[in-house]
Amino acid sequence: MGTIEKGYMGGFKGLLGTAVGSKWKGKSVVKSRPPRKGTTPPTELQLQQQAKFALIIAFLKPIRTLLNETYKKSAAGDMSGHNMAFSVNKDAVTGVYPAIVIDYSKVQLSQGSLFNADAPAAASTAAGKLVFTWTDNSDGENELISDTAFVVAYNPDTKRWVQKQKIATRNAGTCTLDVPAFSGKPVQTYIGFMSANRKKISDSLYTGIVNIL
């Protein structure tokens, strides 16, 4: 039986469905439950949940450092940002087991109260380059010209991420991410903003699939 800590939004210890909650270096962590040996075979629903957890964990693991930063404000109690991101993004897994996949348009790489920029878009206009554009919507109060963008590209074929934080300020309206490894390949793209002091974070926005020149 699992024990919820600090309310229903906190971490938990023990077994909760097919997930196992524990502490690691003072942080709440969630892992998929390993198959039990010598017991009743798992049900179809249990196999589906295990596969779903394994897929999203493997997907997000390479950008753990980014997620610990972009989810640190929304993580409850002593839950890590990475584990909060796992909790949010498990709903991005779609399909019928065993043919489950990630719906990249539903992936959320940050969560917070800061507004993202208006009309964000991504395109490749030169070999190995990914250009992001947006409309500056700074208001001088909550959204400031000094807010900085982070941009992310993911190639499903190689399962590789490229991301850059503090790449441009909100009032710049554009930035370029170097992605030479993705030339000739499609990438899934995302953008978000943080305040200059890193205390405010926006929800990330999906800027679509882009074929890199």
Image: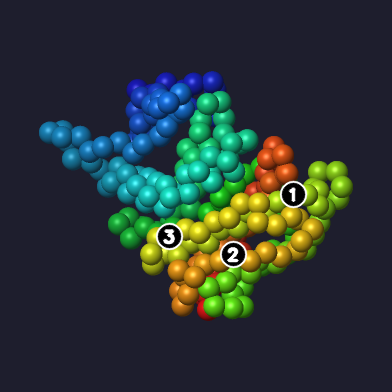
Report the residue marked by disc 3: 160
Whether 190 is drawn above or below 69: the answer is below
Q: Earlier in the sequence, mark 2 or mark 1?
A: 1
Disc 2/disc 1 C-alpha distance (Å): 18 Å
Q: Secondary structure at mark 2?
A: strand
Whether 23 is drawn above or below 145: the answer is above
Residue 66: assigned label: none
Disc 3/disc 2 C-alpha distance (Å): 15 Å
Whether 189 is drawn above or below 199: the answer is below
Report the residue marked by disc 1: 147
Instruction: Tell me the amino acid under the disc marked 3.
Output: Arg
Residue 113 seen: no
Q: Earlier in the sequence, mark 3 or mark 2?
A: 3
Residue 168: % across, % down: 70, 57
Q: Is residue 196 left or right of residue 96?
A: right
Report the residue marked by disc 2: 177
Quadrant location, the N terminus: top left
Q: Who's the residue at 56% across and 50% down the image?
A: 109
Q: Quadrant of residue 170?
A: bottom right
Q: Earlier in the sequence, mark 1 or mark 3?
A: 1
Q: Who's the residue at 53% across and 73% down the image?
A: 128
Whether 168 is drawn above or below 3: the answer is below
Q: Who's the residue at 60% across and 58% down the image?
A: 151
Instruction: Tell me the amino acid under the disc marked 2.
Output: Leu
Q: Are marks 1 and 3 in contact (CB under 8 Å)?
A: no
Residue 86: % across, % down: 47, 43
Disc 1/disc 3 C-alpha distance (Å): 27 Å
Instruction: Tell me the amino acid under the disc marked 1.
Output: Asp
